[in-house]
Image (spheres, rainbow, N blue to C red):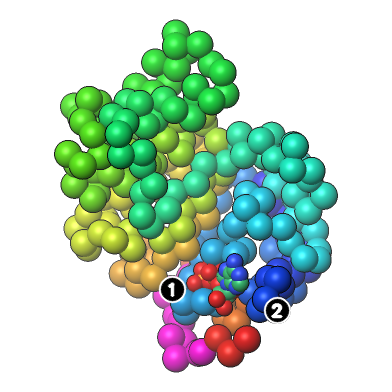
Amino acid sequence: MKLIKVEHAYKIYKNGTTAVADISVNIDKGEFVFVIGPTGCGKSTFMKMLYREEKPTDGKIIVGGIDVSKLRNSKVYKLRRKIGVVFQDFKLLPKLTVYENVAFALETLGLPNSQIRPKVLKAVEAVGLKEKLRNLPSQLSGGEQQRVAIARAIVNEPKLLICDEPTGNLDPDTSKEIMSIIDNINKESGTTIIMATHDKELVNKMKKRVIVIEDGVIASDDMKGRYKVHESVKNTK
Ligand code: ADP
């Protein structure tokens, strides 16, 4: 069953930069997909359009039955409930503890504490951080901070987890741990994963679907792909 359907999507930013040009792709429920390509090729823009951080300039994007291209601003929250997002720089709230950072998303949904607590504990346990519930982000290593960000992203049990270079700030061993946590979330909850990365070793080890973007277009899409990017391709737009 398809979770994501992208048809002839374009993104031309206000300054005239064409970041994505005529991308069409389908992603099934439960799939694990790497998105790779040189810096500036359009990976982030492609993913931002899926969670409506950016609107496509043209084309159609359906995520979990919602037509993202037509979605009104006032209805974006309906889409966001289906999607968790993890970034390279964690984006944790520095004055909140691990527990509070993860609970925050549910509080904004208006859930009562009695429902929030078990969900937070489950998410924190899934990333192996139960011992650090009361720590502040500054009292955690980079890898631990990224685990908190993952717990926050999955706490509402989204259908889709988008990861934009989640291991970009981490050393190789920590990157492997983070990769294994994300892989487990995919296997155990059936959450669809879309992950942009530059980590050649991880991509080659995982043998998952690999979509290569170059200059805003899909250059290749292999079900058991390897990391092959022409890093010398310059974005000339
Ligand atoms: P990647 O994630 O692969 O590094 P991006 O999607 O961030 O690529 O960027 C694709 C292209 O769009 C680049 O040329 C970048 O400079 C440009 N771009 C990204 N965001 C904006 C923006 N908000 N306004 C104008 N241009 C942008």
Distance from mark 2 CB to nearest ligand 1 atom below 8 Å: no
Q: Quadrant of the image for the N terminus? A: top right
Q: Tell me which residue sits at (44%, 49%) in the image.
A: 86
Q: What span is colored magenta in the figure?
A: 225-234
Q: Amino acid at mark 1?
A: Arg
Q: Position of residue 185 (x, y in %)?
A: 42, 40
Relative to 166, is 97 above or below? above
Which residue is rendered at x = 46% and y = 43% of the image?
186
Residue found at x 32% / y 26%: 99
Q: Percent from the top left, x then y, of residue 214?
A: 57, 80
Whether tag 2 and tag 1 are in contact, CB under 8 A, the answer is no
Residue for point 74% across, 62% down: 56
Nearer the viewer's eye, disc 2 or disc 1?
A: 2
Residue 22 is one of the magenta-drawn residues: no
Give the class, few, some or many, for how many residues have Cα within 10 Å of label 1's Cα (few <14, many ≥20). Answer: many
Q: Give the overall secondary structure of the magenta segment.
A: loop
Quarter of the figure with residue 133? top left
Indicate left or right for 160 with 119 as reference.
Answer: right
Q: Which mark is residue 66?
A: none
Circle 2: element type = loop
Badge 2 crowding class, 10 Å Cα cut-off, few under 14, some 14 to 19, many 20 or more, is: few
In the rendered image, the quadrant that contains the C terminus is: bottom right
**Residue of label 2:** 16
**Extreme residue in the top direction:** 114
Q: Earlier in the sequence, mark 2 or mark 1?
A: 2
> What kind of residue is marked 2?
Gly
Q: Determine which residue is flagged by label 1.
A: 226
Report which quarter residue 121 is drawn in.
top left
